[in-house]
Each structure stands twice: as structure tokens, then as C-alpha cells.
Image (cartoon, rainbow, N blue to C red):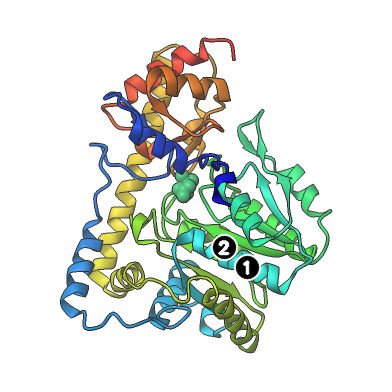
Amino acid sequence: MLEAIQPAPRDAILGLTAAFREDPRSEKINLSVGVYQNELGATPTLESVRIAEQRLAEAATSKSYLPIPGAPEYAEVVQKLAFGAKHEAVQSSRIATAHTPGGTGALRVAGDFLKTNFPNATLWLSDPTWPNHPNIFVAAGVPMKSYPYFDKESNGLAIEPMLEAISKMPAGDVILLHGCCHNPTGIDPTAEQWKQIAEAVYAQGLLPVLDFAYQGFADGIEEDAAGLRAFAQPEAELLLCSSFSKNFGLYRERVGALSIVCPSADAASAVQSQMNRVIRSNYSNPPAHGGAIVNSVLRDDALRASWEKEVATMRERINGMRQQLVEALAAQGVPGDYSFITRQRGMFSFTGLTKDQVETLREKHAIYIVGSGRINVAGLTPTNIERVAEAISEVVGQPA
Ligand code: LMR
């Protein structure tokens, strides 16, 4: 039977990192997967996380199972971080939260929850979006369509086409938005546009899902929740998929959460039971370690303050690299205005490089970026930036 199995295509992002690992060239540079690197090109454990881990190791007494949705204290810190400790939805217990293995796990539990409870709903994804979004929702059996998001001409948000598309979506459908630091474009709505989008989504009778994987990487931890909070109005309903891979540097610990904001505490309790059912038939209950770290850091004033500083350091380094990339491209005489790179937010820059140019960068220059032309700015360092700019200058000079 297994003779007939054909190899699956490589993953659009993690497949590139696998190819990067196999590449014997010593000058290779990986700007594909969204992993933060410091100026030395390393991804060290955050100091706040290291201290929390030490304390957890000393206090550990059991490896027994967590409850299906994870530890209640973790759910509480997740809600407070995203919505704000005093938010009415948090205070009135109308949010059901489950600790999931990463943000991807949160999206998959959301997909299974949607398929089970709203089998006829279509999920609308931004064009473009993170290439794993369609994979996750195909696996969950959720039908998908896309809405316009990126305006190539202005390198900005296609707000009018987006609002127009929302106004035509059937009531009862589901729309996925990126809570901040849109992946792959780096283009986010302004505070005013978030309000317009939230109004349009609710006026149309849609259920929003916010994918929130980069809180703290655009303007700040509180500031980056502005989009989410524009949606989280009294009685509003929404799904929130949180990830702590990037802002806690906990990539391999697989720590995230799905929070479903319901119209009442009673509705939240029924929704929690449905989420638990989905989880039990998938991975049963979450791995404890990553959630315990996030919980420890966020509950300790000193650790939290040092974590916030570490997030600010990562954010500022990325923004510094954006500026330096624009300058390095100008110094190379690359034709065109690349100042849009400094206006994009979060880890990524959507460069406009074509598939062929991306391939040449990999084949000829050993520089790995995602096929859509997305660069992980957090992988640029003072050491590699000149070589990246030179290589881009060379490929842009070629006919596309
Ligand atoms: C990315 O977009 O590079 C990250 O979200 C990592 C991943 O899992 O794809």
C-alpha cells in the first residue's frame, strides 16, 4: 500500500529552512522563517524566560496531565495580556480560553471548532496571507475564499476594496484578520481603519478570527492590541489565536492559546465545552512547559518588566535593520523607492521581489527568502546586510 505514496511538496516556509540546513555553502543567509536573531545572528533564550525556567525547575513536583484547556491561571494571564486586565469581557468571564500548542495549534482548534459548529460558514482570508493558513483550514475541512488586502501600487492597505469585499460577504461567514504585523506584508490598518473594519465586519454579521502572533513587535505590547480591542466591544463575539513563539522566543515550546469571546458567561461555558471536545480528540491536553513559563513571567512584576524590555530590544533592532536595509539598497543604487520598508511593521518586509529573483537569490547568492518575496528583517545583521543589499541589487538589475 505504502509503495504508492508520492512525496509531499516542501512547506513554503519551514521547507526552506530544511533546505537551508542542507546547503553546504558557508556564506548562506536564512531570511525565510520568522525567527528573531540578535545582531550576532543568534536566537538566544530570553533572560526573563531563563529565570522563570530555573524557578519552575526548582518548584516542579509533578508531570501529571493538565486539564484539557490547560491551566486556568495561564488562561487568565493570556486574556489579560491581550484584552487588558480591566477589560469588560475579561471581568465578566465571557471569554473561553484554551492553551494550545503554538499559534498554529490555536488556528487548528479554531478550524475544527468552526467546522463542527458552523459547517456551512466560509472562512475569508486576506490576499496575501501566511501560507500555512490555507493548509490549516483545508485540514480542518473549512471552505475558504480571499478578500483584497494589499495595494501593490502604494505598498499599503487596500482599505476601500477590503471594506467593499466585506460588505458583500454573506452573514454567518467567518473572516480572519492579522491582529498586528500582518504576515507577509507588514502592512497593518491604522487605529481609525481598525474601527472601520470592525464596524463593517459586525454590520455584515460576520464572525472575526484574529491571528495574534506578534504582539509587541510593531509599536508596543499594549499598542499592538489596538486592532483586537477595536473588535472586543461590549457583547461582540470573536476568536483570538495567540502565539508566544515570537514575543517570548518560545518557538520550540509550542505555546499559544485560543480565546473565544462570547456574548455572555453562559455562552462562554458552552463554547469552552465544545473547544474541549475538539482538543480531546486531537492532542488531548496541552504540553505544560511553555505555558508555565509565560504564566510565571507575566505574574511576577520584575520578570514582566524585564520581559517587556527584551521585547522592546527585539522591536528596536528590527526597526533599525529596516532603516539600514533601505540605506544599503540606496547605496547599491537599486532603482526604485524602498522607503516603504521602514513603514512596514513586525518581522517581515514584503519586498516585491519576484519568484525568479527569489530563486536567483537562493541559487546564486545562498540567500533564502520566502517565494512571495517576504524577507525576515529580524534575520538581518550588521554583518550580513551589505551582502544582502548587493545580492538584491544584482537580481533586481536582471530582467524579472
Ligand atoms: C513564519 O511565517 O515564518 C512563522 O510564522 C513561522 C512559521 O511557522 O511559518
Residue 235: x percent and y percent? 67, 78
Contact between marks 2 and 1 (CB within 8 A): the answer is yes
**Where does the C terminus fall, quadrant-wise?**
top right
Q: Residue furthest bottom?
A: 266
Q: Identify the image quadrant of residue 173.
A: bottom right
Q: Element type at marker 2?
A: helix
Q: Which mark is residue 108?
A: 2
Give the residue displayed 64% in from the left and 62% down from the top: 140
Can you say whether 99 is above or below 17 in the image? below
Residue at the image position 52 percent from the left and 78 percent from the top: 280
Number of the label disc, if any, that sits on residue 60: none
Q: Is residue 87 visible?
A: no
SS category of the residue bearing label 1: helix
Callout 2, which amino acid?
Arg
Where does residue 215 sit, x and y in percent of width and height? 45, 57
Tell me: residue 135, above or below residue 260. above
Ligand 1 has an atom within 8 Å of the beta carbon of the residue at disc 2: no
Where is 153 relative to 263, above or below? above
Task: Measure how far apart labels 2 and 1 are at the Cα level.
Answer: 6 Å
For the point 59% across and 84% down, the residue is: 273
Q: Quadrant of residue 202?
A: bottom right
Q: Is residue 39 left or right of residue 166?
A: left
Residue placed under numbered mark 1 in the picture: 112
Q: From where the camera sits, is residue 140 visible?
A: yes
263 displayed left or right of 227 = right
**Residue 270 horizontal/vertical position (percent):** 63, 86
